[in-house]
Image (cartoon, coloured by chain):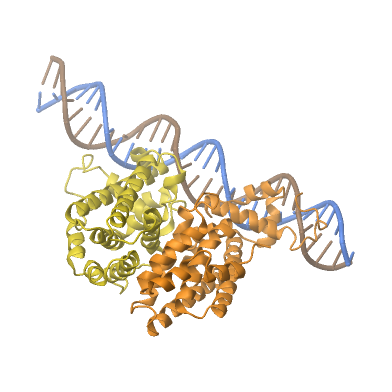
Chain colours: A orange, B yellow, C blue, D brown
Amino acid sequence: MTEPVVAPGRARGGRRDEILATFTRHVAERGYDRANFGDVAAELGMSKGTIVHHFGTKHRLLAEVQERYMRRRLDEAHALLARLPAPEQRIAAFVHAGVRYSTDEPATTVAFQREVVRLTDEPGMETARAQRDAYRDLVVAVLQDGADAGVFLPGDARLRSLQMFGSLHWMWTWFDPAGRLRPGDVAAEFCRTLLRGLGVPEDETATAADPDGPVARCVAEVCAPRP
Amino acid sequence: MTEPVVAPGRARGGRRDEILATFTRHVAERGYDRANFGDVAAELGMSKGTIVHHFGTKHRLLAEVQERYMRRRLDEAHALLARLPAPEQRIAAFVHAGVRYSTDEPATTVAFQREVVRLTDEPGMETARAQRDAYRDLVVAVLQDGADAGVFLPGDARLRSLQMFGSLHWMWTWFDPAGRLRPGDVAAEFCRTLLRGLGVPEDETATAADPDGPVARCVAEVCAPRP
DNA sequence: CTACTCTGCCCGTACGTGCGGTCAGTTCAC
DNA sequence: GTGAACTGACCGCACGTACGGGCAGAGTAG
């Protein structure tokens, strides 16, 4: 209907991607439990059976959403680490990126964040959980390295990472991508408080937090617009 | 059975409080959607009808959980503000208190935090939402006053409050009250990063963050053990 | 004291609905 | 032919909640 480019039955991934996108939006809006096959199918003008045919179970569908999301986030994280050497730049980049997600892919980001707890509980989420842990480990390592190098004041790197992730992951409950609050401003404020809190001097903090500064620009390049 | 003190039929709130407590625990463990009357009733050895009799609907039950929780938090907040005059002490107190909740009332805290989004969406939650907003306004006012007074560096008080609440509200996804991590240590680390990030000098930061310091002690007195 | 009525707590059951998942079958590209 | 995409009817079940009734204690009249 909105995808007449490729012949039906042989579209890129079939209707698989459409299902994934619509399901993701429903999870973002209502949560996993209240999202259901019937509504998704109706919206896409297909049968419930089609969704089952492609994904098997609802759990598997969610798992695929989480895995795809974390795959992109991990790729970006590695690209950022490769370009930015300094610990305070790297932390700032993670914050800028974390805020960008909320506007670049609002639905997927909200779906991921509000259902993140299922990564720890439910079976079948091992891959996504491992990806999430890998991402967190990257941040912890930067925090630890920075503290070891004296760039950051001594402190518990793991707790600091949780403090930082909390601020970012909580955004789904209050941030409106369509609102007047610019993501760059949110990231800047978060960066300033966080980096100062880690003991980074004022001028490095200001540069790294600047929404038009080098770190933010690097993040913008790496986090390309959605295909 | 475990409540032989008062004659049946005239117990303090009847089985009402038991229902509330058990339902709260189920919401904390499984989330609102997966918590159900059948399991709660079975665990308490009563009929589903009894729950309906006392609360009418499932939504009303959740609303009551949220309202009771926020009432306690608001009372504590006002008590803390009355005892602690300095902005950095007040912010530190909010952080210490926020962490304490996770161990003092783990079930209710998790239930509240993981279902907080329903305060904004669902009807019937107006009271709880107003309480939550009032709590946030208290924190925003402290941050604003501190910035106006020059105790904190200039910055967006509202964004700072959201950054702070994010760290605390996210705790339910990772903090284990029975684990080896002491709540005081978490609060101390969070306080240090946050207060330094707000521009508070190192010695005031250290005093306010100290888990055995005056602020933490004041919080411990105000947040009395459960009755 | 007795008998009665009223009332609030509680039970058991039954109903309606919504949802995840199954399955037999059709269409269509290769 | 072969197999993948897709359909639509259907199943079973879990869950919220409506309903009718039982029962015990309080109040009251005699």
Q: Residue furthest bottom?
A: A149
Where residue B70 appears, x then y in whole percent?
31, 49
Does residue B125 lie above or below A166 as drawn? Answer: above
Does residue B178 lie above or below B65 as drawn? Answer: below
Left or right: B227 with respect to B26?
A: left
Say which residue appears at 33% left-offset and 52% top-offset. B140
Where residue B3 appears, x then y in whole percent?
21, 50
Say which residue appears at 74% left-offset and 63% top-offset. A13
Left or right: B190 with respect to A216?
A: left
Taking depth in this image into account, of A222 and B3 the one nearest to the observer is: A222
Report whether residue B16 is seen.
yes
Report whether residue B1 is seen.
no
Taking depth in this image into account, of D10 and B11 the one nearest to the observer is: B11
Q: How many marks?
A: 0
Task: Using the rendered view, name the quadrant where residue C20 is placed.
Answer: bottom right
Say which residue appears at 27% left-offset and 61% top-offset. B151
Quadrant that contains the C terminus of chain A:
bottom right
Where residue B40 appears, x then y in whole percent?
37, 51
Say which residue appears at 59% left-offset and 59% top-offset. A104
Taking depth in this image into account, of A126 and A20 the one nearest to the observer is: A20
Where residue B118 appears, x then y in whole percent?
44, 47
Task: Using the rendered view, name the quadrant where residue D30 is placed.
Answer: top left
Left or right: A87 with respect to B89?
A: right
